[in-house]
Structures are given as structure tokens and as C-alpha cells.
Image: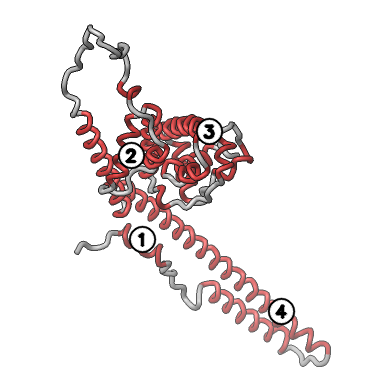
Amino acid sequence: MSEPTPEHETERKTSLGIYDRPSRPSVTGIEIVAIALSVLWLIVSVVFLVLPEKVQGGGFVVTLLAVFMPVAMIWVAATAMRASRVMREESERLQTAIDAIRQAYVVQQQRAASSYEPAVSKKLDEIAETAKKTETALATFSTKRTDPPRMPEPQIKGDQTSLELGTQAEDLAPPLSTEVFIRALNFPETQDDSEGFDALRLALKDRKAAQLVQASQDVLTLLSQEGIYMDDLRPDMARPEIWRQFAQGARGRSVAALGGIRDRSSLALTAARMKQDPIFRDAAHHFLRRFDHMIVDFEPEASDSDLTALGETRTARAFMLLGRVAGTFD
């Protein structure tokens, strides 16, 4: 077992608040000087004020004041000097504690930068495995079409019609259903979520849906680097009519309910990353534009239940978070 380093000891003391107070002597030099001056003054007072003559009445009171008032002033000054010294020492100790806390924080940040927390690492591994499985499934799907394309036959028989040159495969694919589209925007729940992977494969075959899915995957991956996961967020869900107003061009306070993310930590981390990282900022704005285009096309054909289901997807939660940070709902 390795011995604790000075940084570890400093961090331990900082977390426990057990900084050792410097031991102070019960009698300091200030008290010694005050005692000496008090004794000297009492001797002088006795020799020159009390012994020459016996005073009575009012003269006795004046003599007492003349004897003890300077002594009292000496001790008031001594007490003030000691209090000032104690305050100075406390200030130095507090500054030392602040420096130690700052150093411990820097050490902790350096450790966090060099190695992720186990929980964060586990979630990142799960995301990597999910992405890998998706890519493998898509590669398997695409490799089924290995035969070279055949030229259309020159003859036209009966009612048979020929396809125009340049027709894309995605133009021949059936339109993506609303249920599959919403399921794809939520991404697979686990590695064994076959339904989620099927929906994702179908969405990636649709050009517009694929653009939004890829933009969403990019921002979700970048947010995960900050330890922000959509499953951990519990936003205030907006009513379907708010989504419809947003799709029809409303902005600002009228659609503020869409920014239902209340997690201060996630908002602060996202805002800081948005300011400091231009790659993250570009990816976030690209995703917001794709989502904006999607909702415009999606809303006219969607029912209220479809809009509610859309708002519960991971993609919609990322939109709520990034939209609020970007000021879309201000």
C-alpha cells in the first residue's frame, strides 16, 4: 500500500476541515511587557504619591485614579495588540487553507481529466457498443446488395414501364411511418433492443430522417463527454399545442414551455461547453436547425399523441436542453 502523498494529505485535510491551528503560548511578549510596565508604574506611584503624605477623602480617590488608570490603559493597549496579532494569524491561516483548497481542486480536476469516473466510463462504453452494433447491422444490411446493377432491358412488353435513369433507391423506399420515426429518434434502449435497431436502420435509409438522426447522435455523444445523459433529465413536458405553435413559427415566451429542462448542472455545463468549444457549438446549432426543419414537416401530419411521444424522445430532450442554452425560448 503506497504512502499518501502531500497532495493526498492536503486534500484529506481540506475535505475533513482538520487544519491544525498554530499553538499559541498562554503568556506572550505583549503580556510580559504589560506586566513589567504595570509593576513599574505601581512602584513609582507608591513611592511618589502614597508614601509622601497620608491623603484622605477626595484626595484618596484622585490618588487611586492616578495609580490605577495608567495600569488599565496599559492592559487595554496590550489586549488590543494581542487581538490584532490573533486576527493577523487567523487571516494567514485562512489564506493558507484557501490556497490548499485551491491546490486540492486543481489536483482533483487533473485527475478527472486523466481518467473518467467509473459510472461515466460505463455509460460511454455502452454508447460505443451501441454505435458499433448499429454500424455492424447497417454494414450487414448494405452488403446484401453486392450484385452489379443491371441495365434495363431495351424492350417494353405489354404494360411494363421502365424507370428513369438516376432514380435513387431512397426514392423507391416506402415512406417512413410516424411510429418508426419517433422510435428512431429515441435510439435503442439497450444492445438487445432489436425493435429500436430496426427503427434506426429504417430511419437512416430516409434522407431527411437520417440527417436529423446523425445530428442528434453527434450532440448526444458530445454531451455524454460532460456526463450529461438524456435519461437522467426529467423535463417539464410541453402540451401538443405548444409544439404546434413552435412548428408554425412562434418563438420567444409563447413557446417557453418547450425549454422544460430544469437541471442547473446540465444547463451550466452545456452553456460552458457552448462558449468554449467551437466544434460543440457548431454541432449544436446544426442539430437545432435540423430539428426545426423536421418539426415543420412533422407537425401537420402528427396527432397530439404523436407530438407528446416525440417530446419524450432523447432527441427532443437534447433539443430542449440546447434550445434553452441557445436562447431559442427567450
Depth check: give the residue in front, 153 or 85: 153
Amino acid type shown at disc 3: Pro
**Secondary structure found at label 2:** helix
Q: Is residue 208 above or below residue 200?
A: above
Q: Is 114 positioned to the left or the right of 48 in the image?
A: left
- What's the distance in space between the residues labelled 4 and 1, CA to CA? 49 Å
- What's the distance in space between the residues labelled 3 and 4, CA to CA? 94 Å
- What's the distance in space between the residues labelled 1 and 2, CA to CA? 53 Å
Amino acid type shown at disc 4: Met
Q: Residue at x 73, y 84 (%)?
A: 49
Q: Residue at x 33, y 62 (%)?
A: 9
- What's the distance in space between the residues labelled 4 and 2, CA to CA? 94 Å
Numbered tag placed on residue 300 in the rendering: 3
- What's the distance in space between the residues labelled 3 and 1, CA to CA? 62 Å
Query: Pointer 1: residues within 10 angstroms few (<14), some, or many (20+)?
Result: some
**Secondary structure found at label 1:** helix
| Residue labelled with disc 2 | 199
Q: Nearer the viewer, mark 4 or mark 1?
A: 1
Of labels 4 and 1, earlier in sequence is 1
| Residue labelled with disc 1 | 10
Q: Nearer the viewer, mark 1 or mark 2?
A: 2
Of labels 2 and 3, earlier in sequence is 2
Depth check: give the residue in front, 147 or 53: 147
State if disc 4 and disc 3 touch (CB < 8 Å).
no
Query: Pointer 2: residues within 10 angstroms few (<14), some, or many (20+)?
Result: many
Q: Is 200 positioned to the left or the right of 102 in the image?
A: left
Of labels 1 and 2, earlier in sequence is 1
Q: Residue at x 35, y 22 (%)?
A: 171
Q: Position of residue 218 (x, y in %)?
A: 37, 36
